[in-house]
Image: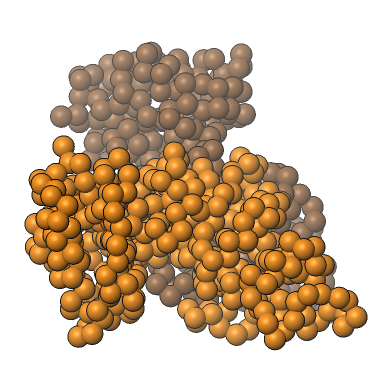
Chain colours: A brown, B orange
Amino acid sequence: MSSYCFGIDVGGTTIKCGLFRTDGEIVEKWEIPTRTENAGENILPDIAQTVLGKIESAGIDKAEVAGIGVGIPGPVRNGKVSVAVNLHWGETDIEGVLGELTGLPIKAGNDANVAALGEMWKGGAEGYSNVIVVTLGTGVGGGIIVDGRIVEGAHGAGGEIGHTHAEDEIEDPCNCGNCGCLEQVASATGVVRLAREELASKDPEEPTVLSLTDLSSRHIFDAYKQEDRVASRIVNRFASYLGKALAGYACVVDPDVFVIGGGVSKAGQPLVDILTRYYKQYAFSASKNTPIVLAKLGNDAGIYGSAKLVLG
Amino acid sequence: MSSYCFGIDVGGTTIKCGLFRTDGEIVEKWEIPTRTENAGENILPDIAQTVLGKIESAGIDKAEVAGIGVGIPGPVRNGKVSVAVNLHWGETDIEGVLGELTGLPIKAGNDANVAALGEMWKGGAEGYSNVIVVTLGTGVGGGIIVDGRIVEGAHGAGGEIGHTHAEDEIEDPCNCGNCGCLEQVASATGVVRLAREELASKDPEEPTVLSLTDLSSRHIFDAYKQEDRVASRIVNRFASYLGKALAGYACVVDPDVFVIGGGVSKAGQPLVDILTRYYKQYAFSASKNTPIVLAKLGNDAGIYGSAKLVLG
């Protein structure tokens, strides 16, 4: 019977590490730098070293460690990543290499998917097993969990919800090459796009605290909370796109709950409220009351989810 | 080691039955009427009787029967259906009751989901384990399979893709109560709606074989194949809605393959070709080449899928 496991969240600049008890209690967390030089050849050895060092310094019997879970910024299938641009990696057999280096069981997953698993295990969706996590940051990320398992997808694109088509009128391309993706209208940068459009087209006499020279998603949501009418139109449009999209996802996998994370989610309950209003408008009857809640784990979702991944 | 299993597809007027070998070869299929009187109280006893009768008449040892799979027109969770309007049923414990009556293992699922499983096992998606089946009939139905398992959803609404929002301009409600659902524009009745709009708004001088008095999805697709330009605009609009929707689903579960069935799919390869063109336009890069294929099992998909359901 194992007592401990490790959750590792590999980012482009730092590697977040967590030592957990198998019941989900975190014992210790720390970070090491991500050494991307020489095609990122040090990354997996560095993880092995920090984990083995922690086992020794904490006086843990290695036989009591269930294994190491690893979240990777790239498409992961069957323990391998085909490419991870931010780590300077080509195809890498994470589970094979790290297993060899540590002698421990390894499970690897995509970082956004793994963070979703963390929110299911110990975050906003605790107690549920069918979950859609939506991360509203610079882009829109997602993680889909069905019956407690991450949906990786046939091409590692499960949960790539930022690239569902949301708007026919947008003619400049998204980072993915398509035009009109959800993340062009419903991310931190997307809501700024909507604000620019609104400020350019509104009656110049209409008062607002927003200005073209100093726009951010935080400014927009702050103005919305202060009942600025221009900000209200922007946030309603944002919530309409996102609520409609969530309603569509519910017709596919019909989750128990939606969890909203990422920088934009700092807008808090007012964001959840308006999003819920639009979600209900578009949702299929059976799923109309599916709750939308805020993420709870913040930047620790990745280490929690990685730990859960290896526990199975 | 079991050699046989039964697949039962319960419809509002007939119950389709199949005796299968466990390798998927069909031994015999037959139908019995669905007796919906008295709140459908005879339906499960009738199924028990026909199955036990077949075991006896075929001279099969009951110990060689793996069990009975049953597809039901209603939302099924954990072997129970909460309501099945077409069968006149309220909440019914299908697995419990039928297990008691037959002494055999029972597995029950929603009929559309089970048909999807059939197409995965022995139909258009044979050899794959991540599949979206889209049934284009009077409405638009669907079944989602992830890692070989049906996605039932938290409220039995997994695969209810007919009710994803597709068009903001539609003001008359869908059967579900919402406005602008995919099945209002991409079913057999949906394409007729688009045709009515096109015929009403086109230049009266423009020639077409289509007429408002005799419109059906078959007429429309036949005219499309004959290069009727009005029909071409209608079918392009239909395929744009559906291709865009499929691209969105691929951002959620990223299947290996899409399978198109139902009456509209009789339009055949020209339908697949134009749908693929629009799908590629909207799909995320990683999923752009996901194949779209025709269903193969027709009305037998339900008995195949039910049989597969009980085999696990």
Quarter of the figure that contains the N terminus of chain A: top left
Q: Residue A25, located in which quarter of the rendered image?
A: top left
The reply to whether residue B86 is in sight is yes
Image quarter where the C terminus of chain A lies is top left
- Determine whether, in the image, residue B210 is placed left or right of residue B65: right
Residue A60 percent location from the top left of the image: 22, 21
Identified at 69% across, 44% down, the residue is: A176
Q: Nearer the viewer, residue A253 or B90?
A: B90
Direction from residue B66 to residue A101 in the image, left or right: right
Q: Is residue A257 visible?
A: no
Q: B107 or A97: nearer the eye?
A: B107
In the rendered image, residue A12, in percent from the top left (x then y), is placed at 57, 30
Residue at position x 29%, y 30% from top? A5
Q: Residue at x 24, y 36 (%)?
A: A22
**Residue positioned 24% across, 35% down in the render:** A21
Q: Residue furthest right?
A: B205
Q: From the viewer's perspective, is residue A79 above or below residue A142? A: above
Query: Which quadrant of the view contains residue A71?
Result: top left
Q: Position of residue A14 (x, y in %)?
A: 52, 29
